[in-house]
Image (cartoon, rainbow, N blue to C red):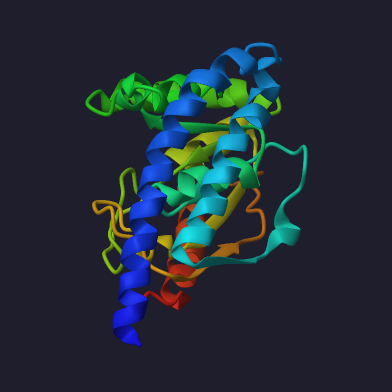
Amino acid sequence: MSGLRSLRGFVGSILFGICYVVLTIVSGVISPPIALLFKPKNRQLVLNVHNAILLALFKIFCGVTVRVKGREHLVKGKPVILVANHQCEWETYFLQVLVTPLSTVLKKELLSVPFFGWGLRMVQPIAIDRSQKSNALKQILRQGKERIEDGRSVLIFPEGTRVKVGERKEFNKGAAMLATSANAPILPMVHNAGYLWTSKSWRKYSGVIDVVIGPEISSEGKKTGELHEEMQNWMREEMAKLPVGR
């Protein structure tokens, strides 16, 4: 039985990988021209078709179920600073569908990736040069505030880079700084997708991805350090509760 399950997972991973590549190329060619027909704030709705299909294929071919706790904390039409742990590509697709419109803080090199980067440019990300930390922070604060004022939420991964399941990395204070600067709330979220969608391997696994969305953390009247600590404590506590085994 375990051998059959392993074979099914192997074949499912291959089929998903093929669909992933094909869908990315097709969407990269078709979606940007269509998205240009919409206002910048609404272009994500077009590109989310790609994201939704990809997530559905992941479920079908790899046998993955997503279990979300805390959906009641999502308020449609209210811009927030969305923060999440970063384990793999899965959360970048999932969060775009979960919160719309959303501008993601990411490394500028991603915009140069063929097909994928073309679509990414359409959703007004905040593309930073991570080698220039001081300028990158100023850019996040300036453009992040502009996005919030325009009614868009901003996604920040406070760990700064992908972190393997079970490993720990210090959180940076960029999200808290933007929240206090823009007078916007932080909406924290954690997940354990990295143990099913491994970031440096084509192999995917079946199982349940748990997502926990926390209540908004108000920035009103708080100092950056205080807000950062409140956000970090919630995320650490909730991450520790998530199952991480196959």
Q: Position of residue 31 (x, y in %)?
A: 57, 22
Where is residue 10, by image quadrant?
A: bottom left
Quarter that holds the C terminus: bottom left
Is residue 88 in view from this perspective? no
**Observer-nearest of 46 and 26:** 26
Would you place residue 40 above or below residue 125 in this image? above
What residue is drawn where x is 51% and y is 27%?
A: 27
Q: Is residue 57 left or right of residue 153?
A: left
Q: Is residue 75 left or right of residue 133?
A: right
Where is residue 137, by image quadrant?
A: top left
What residue is drawn where x is 31% and y is 58%?
A: 198
**Observer-nearest of 239 and 175:** 239
Furthest toward the bottom, the residue is: 1
Q: Position of residue 178 (x, y in %)?
A: 52, 34
**Observer-nearest of 229 and 207:** 207
Q: Is residue 113 left or right of residue 85?
A: left
**Observer-nearest of 159 and 39:** 39
What residue is drawn where x is 65% and y is 38%?
A: 184
Q: Position of residue 43 (x, y in %)?
A: 65, 23
What residue is drawn where x is 66% and y is 44%?
A: 220
Quarter that holds the N terminus: bottom left
Q: Position of residue 177 (x, y in %)?
A: 48, 37
